[in-house]
Image (spheres, helix red, strand yellow):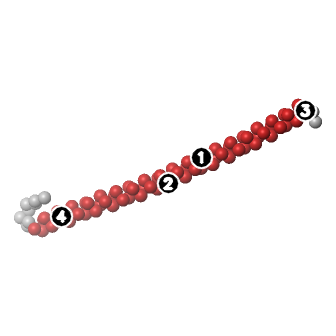
Amino acid sequence: MSLASKITLSLALVSSCGIIFSVHYMQQSEREKLHVGVVKDIERQRRRKLENISILEQQQELTRKYQESLEQEPSGDVKL
């Protein structure tokens, strides 16, 4: 083998290994970013659920107070 062909082969091997490594690294980092997005979505859904439960409890309390006020005043006048 001549020196030029050895250099060409070496450069081809080094660049191929570099390309394979960089593609693998990019895939790994994209996979991690996607996982972080899923975790954020789950946390956002959990916060929304807690907020909705809190709003529901407030509405139930207001409904209960309203019904109590209706029972206390049969004349139809409502005091809030």
- Front in this rendered view, residue 64 or 43: 43
Q: Quadrant of the C terminus?
A: bottom left
Q: Which residue sits furthest left? A: 75
Question: How far apart are the alpha carbons under marks 1 and 2?
Answer: 14 Å
Upstream in sequence: badge 2 or badge 3: 3
Contact between marks 1 and 2 (CB within 8 A): the answer is: no
Q: Amino acid at mark 2?
A: Val
- Residue 12 in the figure: left or right of residue 34: right
- Residue 62 in the figure: left or right of residue 53: left
Upstream in sequence: badge 1 or badge 2: 1
Upstream in sequence: badge 4 or badge 3: 3
Could you tell me which secondary element the residue under label 3 belongs to? helix
Residue 23: percent from left, percent from top: 68, 43
Contact between marks 2 and 3 (CB within 8 A): the answer is: no
In the rendered structure, find residue 65 and report the number of the disc placed on it: 4
Residue placed at 15% from the left, 67% from the top?
68
Q: Which residue sits furthest top? A: 4
Neighbourhood count class around disc 2 (C-alpha, 10 Å): few under 14, some 14–19, many 20 upward: few
Labels 3, 1: front one: 3
Neighbourhood count class around disc 1 (C-alpha, 10 Å): few under 14, some 14–19, many 20 upward: few
Q: Which residue is mark 1?
A: 30
Compared with 10, 74 (above or below) is below
In the rendered structure, find residue 16 and report the number of the disc placed on it: none
Residue 43: percent from left, percent from top: 44, 55
Question: How far apart are the alpha carbons under marks 4 and 1?
Answer: 53 Å
In the rendered structure, find residue 39 and report the number of the disc placed on it: 2
Q: Which residue is mark 3?
A: 3
Could you tell me which secondary element the residue under label 4 belongs to? helix
Residue 71: percent from left, percent from top: 12, 68
Residue placed at 60% from the left, 47% from the top?
29
